Image (cartoon, rainbow, N blue to C red):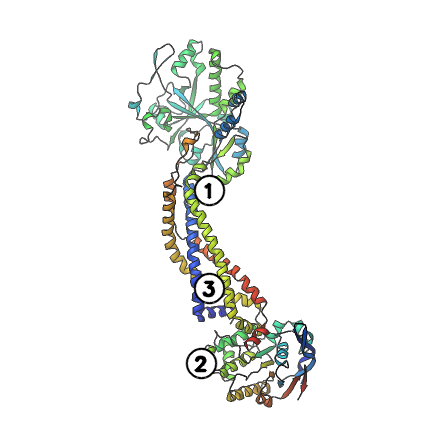
Amino acid sequence: MSAILKLENICYGYTDGSYKREILKHLSYEFQEGTFYTILGPSGSGKTTLLSIMAGLDKQEEGKIYFMGEDIDKMGLYKYRRNKIGVVFQSYNLITYLTGLENILLSMTETDNKLPGNQKELAYALLNMVGIANTKAERLVTHLSGGEQQRIAIARAIASNVDLIFADEPTGNLDTATEQEIIKLFQMLSERYGKTIIAVTHSNEVSKFSDHRVLLKNGILNDL
Amino acid sequence: MNFLQRAFNYVIRKPTKSLLLAVTFFVIGNLVILGLGISQAADNAKILTRKKMRAIVSYEVDYNKYWNYIESLEDSDAQDAAYKNYPKIDKETALNIAKDERVRAFNYMTNNTVYGLDIEHNPLGNEDNRNGNTYTDENGNEVEYKEPSFMVYANLFPNMIELEEGTFEIKDGRWYSQEDIDSAKRVVCITEEVADLNSLRVGDTITISQISPAQKKDLIDAGLSEDDVNLELEIIGIYSTKEDVDPNSDNFKWMSPYESPKNRLMIPLTTYAEYAFEVSVAQRKAHPDWFSSGTDEEQIRSELETPSKVVYLLDDPLNVDAFVDENQSKCAEYTRLNANNDAFKKMARPLDTMSFFASIVVWIVVLNAVVIISLVTALTLKTREFEIGVLLSIGVSKLKIVAQLFVELIVLAFIGFGFASISGSLMAGRVGELVLDYQTTSDQKYESDDEDSYVWTSSTDYFTTVTQDQLLSEYHVSVSPLLIVEIFLLGTGVVLIAIVIPSFMIMRLNPKQILLEQN
């Protein structure tokens, strides 16, 4: 296995008046391909900040991030987000005036990594894979349950044909049964399709089923 | 699912927001159509009326200006000198102006009344009213006054306006040529009415004189011969003219025969000037005491060869103003190019006032539209930050997000303006009529102020007379396809400007912050 994502000497902090609070302190870590990671840590430890930086939604103050050996700053964060990664959020973050299918198609249209074939059929196939039937796929996402919306969010994350998926508290808004289903989905994506999943979570259930658990504490990552 | 599809989906699936914006555009559209419709109708009325007027500009002495100048002189000697040195139009300048490519034809022409010695004039039909003209001479004798029967029109160039416009048409023979003019050949073109009445043909001759029978008798008594004061002309062309007198006009009853277009004799200017010069010299010989001393022959010739005005026929009535503006600088002081615009401008004042206010309304509405749409979009943007954050998180560029917003607004603008173009056209017509009625019944109604100024009119006037009623009858507010295109372009412009502020807001959005706040 080779490193899909390499963090090198990452620093990040907040300035609160004259006081500077350092969140990430020269953090270095390598995430391997096809592995399901969970990042754990106490509240305020900087888990979501780290995820945002890794997902190209924010910029580190110092250090480098390499995706498959390529510096993502040089690649460009828009291009990185569009073509290399997918993100799943706690509150799904789907476009509410679009149907489930359209949310998937949106992601498929934007990426430069288009899967060959009829895009609509591929979108249906992806949705079916995450357990969304065609009839539900054609409803506005606001007419679906939280679990269904999160499934669609996961489908959207992989719709751009990426190998790396970030998830920020992906089961935070879901009941236990649905949480299990989502965990299984991540496991399937990792095991069957070789996707790398990096999930930030508080949930022991999620971390229990991951391949690798990492703790963020005092601004650095340590394997558990 | 590109930005166009997203935009259409947003418009359809957010009906309340879309409806509110479409209604805003509808109201704006109606006001803009109203303003532009009224303004355009006023402009159209002026253009249509202008087109009905002949494309005529005259190069002439600015009498009002010169008289004002003379009145400003305090020294009476200077005033006398000014009266003697009256400004004249300049031949070189006239020809220079005629080189303008918009000039189709021009008349460098003088006219003078003459007596037909061996030809009868075409009767006007008012002769019963005009018998018995007599006057008493210095010896107390009652003398019958015989008025001139023909009008000589003498042009320096063969390409006359009347021929160019088709008012004259040669029926037999030919028009005089430049060669005839240059050699001052004694040739004439007469109307077919005069030719028929006198059984004249091409090749025949006619004799005319600018001296009245009474004056002639006096000159012959003083030792001059008939040949000294008569002009024999060979008929080289017989023409028809579309012009005629109007028997219903106020002055028909008193009209002289020479005023009839049928009694015009067309001859080269050089021919007539030479003849008039010879007559003048003969008169001075016969009665040197009648004339002031010191007038040289060159001055007499120059006066005889210089018309009171040069008239240009242009290719398009709408080119008249530009022609005047561009060529005015060629005219010497106290001469001018006159397009007869002053009266037209006064008549058009109600339309101009209306057009002015309508344009102001349009600008106010457009400015308000920009502000309103900017604010509405900016406020809507606040509620759509989450959506933008999501789009940014999946790598959609900010430019595409702005483009989506723009398309959404354009779609709604086009829907609003589409309905407005129907309702606005109905409204604009009615409101336009109401405003025009108010304008014309108010104190701005045009009244001729001819009484307060000097107006020089002559039979060489070529201007078309237009009344204010004719002008206002051309005022019709209608929403033309061109106006609709203008409104849609304006709407696109408004949306483009209105999107600027929201675009800046989008550019400074940070996806992490938006999504963190949301989560």
Residue at image point 37% right, 26% down: B259
Q: Residue B226: x, y in percent?
A: 42, 13
Report whether A109 appears left or right of B255. right
Q: Are the residues tagged 2 and 3 within 8 Å (C-beta)?
A: no
Mark 1, secondary structure of its residue: helix
Mark 3, secondary structure of its residue: helix
Residue B200 in the image: above or below residue B491: above
Report whether B333 appears left or right of B361. right
Q: Which mark is residue B318?
A: 1
Res. B151 image quadrant:
top left
Q: Residue B201: x, y in percent?
A: 38, 24
Kind of residue indicated by mark 1: Leu
Q: Residue A122: x, y in percent?
A: 52, 79
Circle 2 sits on which residue?
A: A135
Circle 3 sits on which residue?
A: B411
Q: Residue B5: x, y in percent?
A: 49, 69
Work out which quarter of the rendered image holds the C terminus of chain A and state it.
bottom right
Q: CA distance from mark 1 to mark 3?
A: 38 Å
Mark 2, secondary structure of its residue: helix
Kind of residue indicated by mark 3: Val
Residue B257 in the image: above or below residue A59: above
Question: B212 or A196, which is in the foreground?
Answer: A196
Residue at image point 46% right, 53% down: B362
Please state the chain letter of the residue tagged with numbered disc 2 in the rendered image. Answer: A
Q: Are marks 1 and 3 on the same chain?
A: yes
Q: Are marks 2 and 3 on the same chain?
A: no
**Which mark is first along the chain, 3 or 1?**
1
Res. B92 image quadrant:
top right
Question: B270 or B514, which is in the foreground?
Answer: B514
Residue lying furthest front:
A18
